[in-house]
Amino acid sequence: MPFTKSQQIEAYRRMLRIRRFEIEGTRLFKAGKIPGAYHASTGQEAAIVGACMALRDDDAMTGTHRSHGHPIGKGADLNGLMAELMGKETGICKGRGGSMHLADNSVGIIGESAIVGGGIPLATGCGLSAKVRRSEQVTLCFFGDGAVNQGTFHESLNMASLWKLPVIYFCENNGYAIITSVARSHGQPSIAKRAQAYGMPGVVVDGQSVSDVFDATSEAAARARRGEGPTLIEAKTYRFDEHNVGLLVPGEPYRPPAEVEEYTTRRDPIALYRQALSATGFSDSDLCAIENEAAEAVSQAIEFAERSSLPDPATLYDYLYSNPVESRLRSH
């Protein structure tokens, strides 16, 4: 299922927004304006956007600790996202979620978690809900290569396979869990092959090619909507930055310098896609206009977030608990 011309433009726009957002977010974090930790998804834009653009607006999604880019890939409002990272009341979680615990129901994001593999069972439950409701909704579940050795990965894929749940398990395999390589931590380094144990398709895709990721995810989504169950996609991608901003690793570099250079100079997903768009007839002025638009959108989000107020300390315990009975009574 190839991209239409409008989808090509939108894919490029979202990839650029993620890249600019992460660049500015890193700068703001170093300046002390974003609390906590900061895990940038720079370099993984094609995997994120290609997968998200294969979804319907009402499809659900779960993310990871490295998930600033995922809401943008699904079309989230940049203002609320940047404000959330700064801990402001105008954030998508009113400043309570921060960098690693985002949720945005407006674009179907039911939660992102700093717990490795924490989103996998949530996505499985969301898929079960869709099947029970017969909504034909799909859940896209992002996780990293480090999560596939967690028990929740195996339990969730087994359940999803048995019950033919409409879930796309999407592994952003950037090769390293913090500083530990896949080769040193996986007895079976091919993550996609693990799908065979659960009777579902396992697909390997070039995570630096947004169109390849879109095609693979679109096929998995169509399969899920037909009631044929889950798919495991392994997108081979790469993070350009350290695991988190400011991480200092003593001793020899854990990533070979030649490997880092290969991805950051010749395998940059945005540069690759720009070349592809140029080859299909987009002019340099067309592409520059999209690039300027993305930069301006992030600048406006920063201005919005910096103007916004921090939450009132008196509201510290607000939103901690929900009374479903009381909520149901109010709805009637």
Image (tube, rainbow, N blue to C red):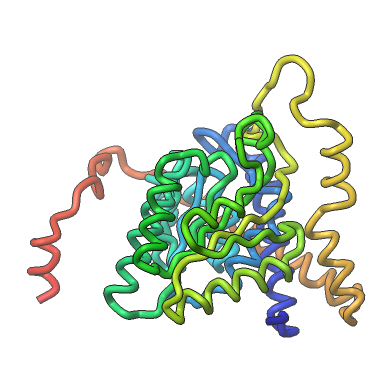
Q: Residue 324: x percent and y percent?
A: 14, 60
The reply, left or right, for residue 6 in relation to residue 110 is right
Q: Residue 279: x percent and y percent?
A: 92, 76
Q: Which of these two is toward me, 225 or 287? A: 225
Give the position of the C terminus as an image quadrant: bottom left
Q: Is residue 90 visible?
A: no
Q: Residue furthest top?
A: 251
Q: Which of these two is toward me, 11 or 23? A: 11
Give the total number of marks visible in the rendering: 0
Q: Residue 140: x percent and y percent?
A: 49, 63
Which residue is painted at 71% across and 80% down in the image?
3
Which residue is painted at 39% across and 61% down in the image?
160
The reply, left or right, for residue 116 in relation to residue 70 is left
Give the position of the N terminus as an image quadrant: bottom right
Q: Which of these two is toward me, 168 or 6? A: 168
Which residue is painted at 78% across and 65% down in the image?
291
> Is 326 placed above or below 267 here?
below
